[in-house]
Image (cartoon, grey):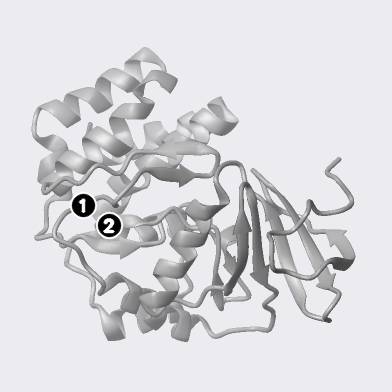
């Protein structure tokens, strides 16, 4: 059971008057709190430095993404404005596409950060296939059975990955951990693992544990039409989050890895 009361808040914020734990939070504890000045906030105890998550939220917000405002950050404690109210998937699709129009000169981020509780390497790399292979796939080969690891490693070293991944990719700002649990009310984006990557990686992950609402996809393509062949690349781009899930949650996700390798002919 998590603590019933949130931790002490960062300096400059009023005291907590009332609080209750919130459901969810696979890798951190979360509370809904009312401050002494009447504001409703969300308090999160992060699995690592809270400033990493705050930076990601601010980066998405600056790029046109709908994120809660960061109110305070200190150590592993993050305080956000409490947001609620239904949104519109088509509008969210447009906003996500707008985020993806923010680009860099290379793939990566100015520092490493976290995906869930795990370290995420973000060394600047000019080649998208190399970034994908070296920083999103290779670090997790050790969690795979030897036969699956060998299949993926062969594809990484014999040009098969490059042949699928390369489609004149630009380094787009991405959420980086965009599954349904990190989208609130079809309106808000939370818990990012930001970096610059192929924008399709966000859509691939959103489709991995559910499906992309058709209205959201329509809104997305109004702003940023997808390149031909993105459905085939989706199998490749779903491998990194599946490998993260194998590491965090175990062998139940190995079937998903094998299915993507099969679909890719690897």
Q: Residue furthest top?
A: 146
Residue 36 shows up from this direction: yes
* x and y, in percent, of residue 217 in the image: 38, 76
Q: Position of residue 187 (x, y in %)?
A: 56, 78
Q: Is residue 170 left or right of residue 189?
A: left
**Sequence-wise, which precedes: disc 1 or disc 2?**
1
According to the image, label 2 marks what residue?
196
> Residue visible at 20% across and 46% down?
124
Q: Nearer the viewer, residue 98 or 217?
A: 98
Vertical placement of 239 versus 217: above or below? above
At 21% from the left and 67% from the top, the residue drawn is: 103
| Residue pictured at 48% horizontal, 58% vertical | 192
Q: Which part of the image, by quadrant, shows the C terminus?
A: top left
Question: Gap in Å between the C-alphas at discs 1 and 2?
Answer: 5 Å
Query: What residue does disc 1 label?
Result: 107
Whole-percent x, y for residue 48 in the image: 57, 42
Q: Are marks 1 and 2 in contact (CB under 8 Å)?
A: yes
Q: Position of residue 211 (x, y in %)?
A: 48, 63
Closest to the observer: 117 or 24?
Answer: 117
Circle on res. 19: none
Between 160 and 40, the one nearer to me in the picture: 40
- Can see residue 256? no
| Identity of the residue furthest to the front in this view | 12
Q: Residues within 10 Å of mark 1 (few under 14, many from 20)?
A: many
Asked which secondary structure carries label 1, the reply is loop
Q: Badge 2: few (under 14), some or many (20 or more) residues near its Cα, within 10 Å?
A: many
Give the side of residue 244 with respect to residue 130, left or right. Answer: right
| Image quadrant where residue 203 sits | bottom left
Which image quadrant: the N terminus? Answer: top right
């Amino acid at each position: 059971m998590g603590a019933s009361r949130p931790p002490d808040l960062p300096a400059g914020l009023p005291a907590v008057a009332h609080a209750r734990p919130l459901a969810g939070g696979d890798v951190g504890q979360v509370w809904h709190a009312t401050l002494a000045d009447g504001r409703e906030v969300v308090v999160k105890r992060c699995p690592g430095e809270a400033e990493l998550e705050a930076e990601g939220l601010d980066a998405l917000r600056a790029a046109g993404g709908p994120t809660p405002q960061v109110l305070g950050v200190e150590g592993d404690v993050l305080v956000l404005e409490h947001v609620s109210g239904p949104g519109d998937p088509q509008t969210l699709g447009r906003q996500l596409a707008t985020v993806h129009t923010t680009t860099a000169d290379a793939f990566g981020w100015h520092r490493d950060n976290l995906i869930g509780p795990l370290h995420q390497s973000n060394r600047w790399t000019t080649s998208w296939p190399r970034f994908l292979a070296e920083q999103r796939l290779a670090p997790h080969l050790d969690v795979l059975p030897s036969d699956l690891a060998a299949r993926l490693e062969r594809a990484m070293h014999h040009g098969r990955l490059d042949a699928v991944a390369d489609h004149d990719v630009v380094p787009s700002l991405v959420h980086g951990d965009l599954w349904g649990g990190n989208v609130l009310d079809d309106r808000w984006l939370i818990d990012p693992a930001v970096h610059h990557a192929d924008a399709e990686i966000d859509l691939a992950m959103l489709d991995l544990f559910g499906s992309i609402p058709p209205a959201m996809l329509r809104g997305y393509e109004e702003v940023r039409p997808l390149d031909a062949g993105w459905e085939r690349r989706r199998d490749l781009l779903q491998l990194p989050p599946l490998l993260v899930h194998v590491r965090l949650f175990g062998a139940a996700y190995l079937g998903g890895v094998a299915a993507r390798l099969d679909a890719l002919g690897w």
